[in-house]
Image (tube, rainbow, N blue to C red):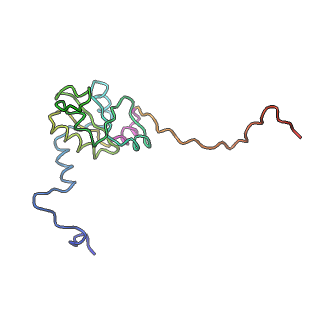
């Protein structure tokens, strides 16, 4: 069957947009930063926000000093008018650089922050993966420990025969 078969690709409702269109529209509004530019912005006072789930951060590592806010609560934590905001949500001129694993979800998140009025929100092209490849500071992940291939040391006082 072809991919255009209605059973496999239903006709979208009028006015709806596919994710590729939504992503392109979000990115068209952003002044996206490459990892080096994002690092400089962070060092210059921008809030670097890692929206990856904790499990993904644990598996791939983190950026030292980045504020971890999972995507599902991002808008509530950074909206200056919201009672659930973090202390870092000090105003609408706050420069926010959003980081995800590969730079897709972060574009959507940064556009959502702009919708809240955080007009300086943007994201990192290539996400954490590109940040790491660029050789910028990262922590972890901690490699799993491997069992020693050496024989255990002899126990003191053990009688030899």
The C terminus: image quadrant: top right
Extreme-bottom residue of the structure: 1
- Looking at the picture, does residue 5 appear above or below residue 45? below
Extreme-front residue of the structure: 83
Residue at 32%, 43% in the rendered image:
126
Extreme-right residue of the structure: 161
Q: Nearer the viewer, residue 94 or 20?
A: 94
Residue at 18%, 51% in the rendered image:
22
Give the residues drawn in magenta, as a range. Answer: 127-136
Q: Position of residue 74 (x, y in %)?
A: 26, 38
Q: In terms of image quadrants, where is residue 48?
A: top left
Extreme-left residue of the structure: 14
- Looking at the picture, does residue 46 appear above or below residue 113? above
Q: Position of residue 155 (x, y in %)?
A: 77, 35
Q: Position of residue 131 (x, y in %)?
A: 36, 38
Residue at 22%, 36% in the rendered image:
76
State left or right for residue 55 relative to residue 24.
right
């Amino acid at each position: 069957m072809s991919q255009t078969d209605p059973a496999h690709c239903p006709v979208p409702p009028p006015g709806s947009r596919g994710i590729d269109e939504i992503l392109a529209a979000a990115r068209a509004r952003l002044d996206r930063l490459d990892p080096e530019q994002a690092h400089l912005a962070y060092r210059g006072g921008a809030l670097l926000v890692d929206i990856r789930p904790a499990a993904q951060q644990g598996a791939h590592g983190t950026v030292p000093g980045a504020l971890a806010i999972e995507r599902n609560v991002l808008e509530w934590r950074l909206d200056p008018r919201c009672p659930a905001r973090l202390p870092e949500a000090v105003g609408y001129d706050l420069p926010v650089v959003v980081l995800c694993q590969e730079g897709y979800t972060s574009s959507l998140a940064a556009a959502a922050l702009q919708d809240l009025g955080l007009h300086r929100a943007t994201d990192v092209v290539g996400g954490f993966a590109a940040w790491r490849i660029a050789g910028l500071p990262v922590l972890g992940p901690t490699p799993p420990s491997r069992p020693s291939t050496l024989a255990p040391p002899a126990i003191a006082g053990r009688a030899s025969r």
